[in-house]
Amino acid sequence: MHPKHAPTSTLLLPTRDGLHELHVAEYGAPGGTPIVYLHGGPGGGTPPDVPRLFDPAVFRLVTFDQRGCGRSRCADRLLANTTALLIDDVEAVRCRLGIERWAVFGSSYGSLLVALYAARHSARVTFAIAHGVFLGTRAEVGWLYEAPGASRFYPDQ
């Protein structure tokens, strides 16, 4: 992992519907290979050590907290918060930052967003990486919330 480093810039980007503001942060080299990190969740946020995964001399890393997550702002976390709108938000971030094409990297639920974004905006994607893949299938959701899935690891929760 690379040493901790501060973002080169941050902004609050209003969503197109005006109901949310996305906390966006950039790290690394402005002229580096642009890559966006899509966090898991929903409901989580960008893990603090994510920037340490990317060499700041090579990558222009973009992170943002999805609608209702992390440091993003809204009056109601669930209002106008759908997977389709999250995909629109990824594209809005790319446009706002003036990035022609970028790599997309997602973890867990973010891997579903990577797959959907890459399918919908393939001309904007240089490559895609999915980590800890979660595609929201009935079997995956069942494993999370029904016996004998994840409950066997943390039965009290």
Image (cartoon, grey):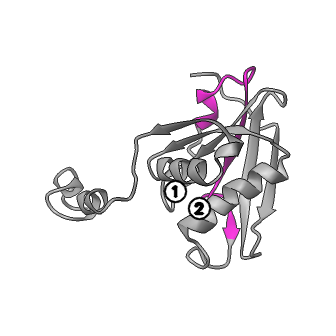
Left or right: residue 20 versus residue 141 is right
**Percent coordinates x, y for residue 82 in the rendering:** 55, 70
**Element under disc 1:** loop
Q: Residue at x 58, y 73 (%)?
A: 77
Q: Is residue 52 visible?
A: yes
Left or right: residue 105 versus residue 148 is right
Q: Are marks 1 and 2 in contact (CB under 8 Å)?
A: yes
Left or right: residue 133 versus residue 148 is right
Q: Residue 89 occupies which quadrant of the picture? A: bottom right
| Residue of label 1 | 44
**Percent coordinates x, y for residue 119 in the rendering:** 57, 50
The numbered disc on residue 1 is: none
Number of numbered discs overlaid on the protein picture: 2
**Element under disc 2:** loop
Is 151 placed above or below 31 here? below
Residue bounds of the magenta highlight: 49-73
Left or right: residue 84 versus residue 90 is left
Q: Residue 103 occupies which quadrant of the picture? A: top right
Q: Residue 138 occupies which quadrant of the picture? A: bottom left
- Amino acid at circle 2: Cys
Magenta stretch: includes residue 54: yes
Taking depth in this image into account, of 126 and 94 the one nearest to the observer is: 126
**Looking at the image, is mark 1 or mark 2 earlier in the sequence?**
1
| Residue of label 2 | 69
Q: Residue at x 48, y 47 (%)?
A: 111
Point out the image quarter for the C terminus: bottom left
- Amino acid at circle 1: Gly
Point out the image quarter for the N terminus: top right
